[in-house]
Image: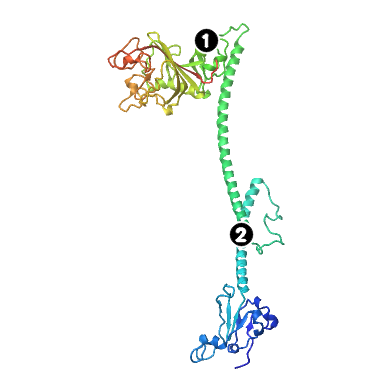
Amino acid sequence: MGQARKPAVHGSSSYGSGQCKQAHSLVSTVQVTPDDEDSGMSPCAHHEDRADVRVLDPAAVRAPGRRGDGRRAGCGGEGRRPGCPVRFKAAGQCGDGEECPYQVTLPPLTIQLPKQFRMLEKTMKELQSLKETVKKLKSQCQQCRQPAEHNLQRDSGEVLPLDQPARGDKDEGGDPDGRGRDPESAAALLEMQQKMDRMSNSLKNARTNITKLQGRLEGLNLINMDNVKSIVDSKVENMTAVISNLSKCSSACPSQSSPQFVMAPRDCSDYNMMVEKKNGVYKVTPEPRSGTFEVYCDMESYGGGWTVLQRRLNGSVNFNRTWAAYKEGFGNVRGEFWLGNDRIHQLTKAKDMVLRIELEDFQGVREYAKYDRFYVSNEFLRYRLTVSGYSGTAGDALHFNKHYNHDQKFFTTPDKDNDMYPSGNCGAYYSSGWWFDACMSANLNGKYYKEKYKGVRNGIFWGTWHNMTQEYYPTNYRNPFKTVKMMIRPKNYAP
């Protein structure tokens, strides 16, 4: 056997007493030359306690790896190979119960590396993983920083100088590759990135909402400007007419009793400022776009300010009319009339109105029904009635029971069926236009009878009248009404 040579250890100059003391820093692989494998010498035998190098019995080492013919297993068979690869394997449990990192077998030597080697390996792996994580976070931050700063600059109007670095960039003395950062720093960077993303999304949502609000505000401004313009135009027209009349009037101009110079009153309550209040016909303008029309104003009853919608006096006007007639109105406001569904809608739309119904029969009995809320929709909604808040002496015939309730019902005429009766037209059966249910407990537009009648109850009807129990049987006489009046005024009216 030739002279034993020392194992060559990459990363270490030689094996001496000084180098054996540095066995804990051994990290590189170990290679064995052919002459070393049969050597039983241990260059570090006298330092095995320090270097954790153990010398085993050559027979014990060779026994597991030798065949019966003396050839080494795994080293080539018949002849001797130039060298066998060195294998690193775990050495089982160390003395403190932990798994030793590696055991190097150099026949006939077995070198067990210290356990600090495994700790060093774990530390290096963790450091490498942390470094890669920090690089990823840094690249992501750089990617998201540019659009975020661009959005902030665009919103605030700031422009960074070309020579000024963006916020968050490291100086030359910084830590560009993330070395030395602990997991807490990585978590802080991740949280900062999430906050920046949320801020960017919030800014985008805020910009979208501001754009929508600006559009709505512009639309509202246009609508308001149109309304103001129409009102101003109406006022100017009235003032022009007044000035022209004054210019024509001489010094001996006679006094005029009618309120010709009241500017654009919306209903009769706007004439309450007059010194002298008298019943009569006045002009009102509920909506400037719809024009001015005449109404009959009751300025004397119950504080005045009442705009009359319907009146029955003597039967001179036939109320068996078509949808178009009830839409436009008919009759004479100084006598019997229906003001018109379009005009009633305009009056009740302009202000919150109170409805007062006054009835008188041919026996001289007078009663009334008052409702704190009264509104009629437009033609598109078929002039639907909204009425509530009853008080009075005539009874609440408009809310008689669940089968006869005129609230929230559409207007029906003989030629346009909008009632709730499935088998026919209540307007055609009762010869009038009204807010029928299926069919009625009240109908103030029925036929005017001057005396009692029998048969179909198609006359003026109020289902809660004081003697109505006598009419329950079809063979009994129906009691007619002498006068009926429907009138409204604003709910906040103060006489």
Residue found 62% across the figure and 66% down from its top? 127
Local secondary structure at mark 2: helix
Q: Earlier in the sequence, mark 1 or mark 2?
A: 2
> Where is 176 relative to 426, above or below?
below
Question: What's under tag 1, amino acid-wise?
Answer: Lys
* Residue 86 in the image, given as x and y percentages of width and height: 57, 82
Q: Are marks 1 and 2 in contact (CB under 8 Å)?
A: no
In this view, which residue lies farthest toward the bottom? Answer: 1
Residue found 58% across the figure and 76% down from its top? 102
Residue ID for mark 1: 278
Q: State the quadrant of the N terminus.
A: bottom right
* Residue 399 in the image, given as x and y percentages of width and height: 40, 23
Local secondary structure at mark 1: loop
> Where is 58 relative to 455, above or below?
below
Residue ID for mark 2: 137
Q: Is residue 331 visible?
A: no
* Residue 138 in the image, given as x and y percentages of width and height: 63, 59
Q: State the quadrant of the C terminus.
A: top right
* Residue 369 in the image, given as x and y percentages of width and height: 44, 17
The residues tagged by marks 1 and 2 sit, at their Cα atoms, a distance apart of 87 Å
In this view, which residue lies farthest toward the left? Answer: 475
> Where is 64 relative to 245, above or below?
below
Question: What's under tag 2, amino acid-wise?
Answer: Leu
Q: Residues within 10 Å of mark 2 (few under 14, many from 20)?
A: some
Q: Nearer the viewer, mark 1 or mark 2?
A: 2
When asked about the image quadrant of residue 325, the answer is: top left
Q: Is residue 147 visible?
A: yes
Q: Is residue 54 left or right of residue 474?
A: right
Q: Residues within 10 Å of mark 1 (few under 14, many from 20)?
A: some
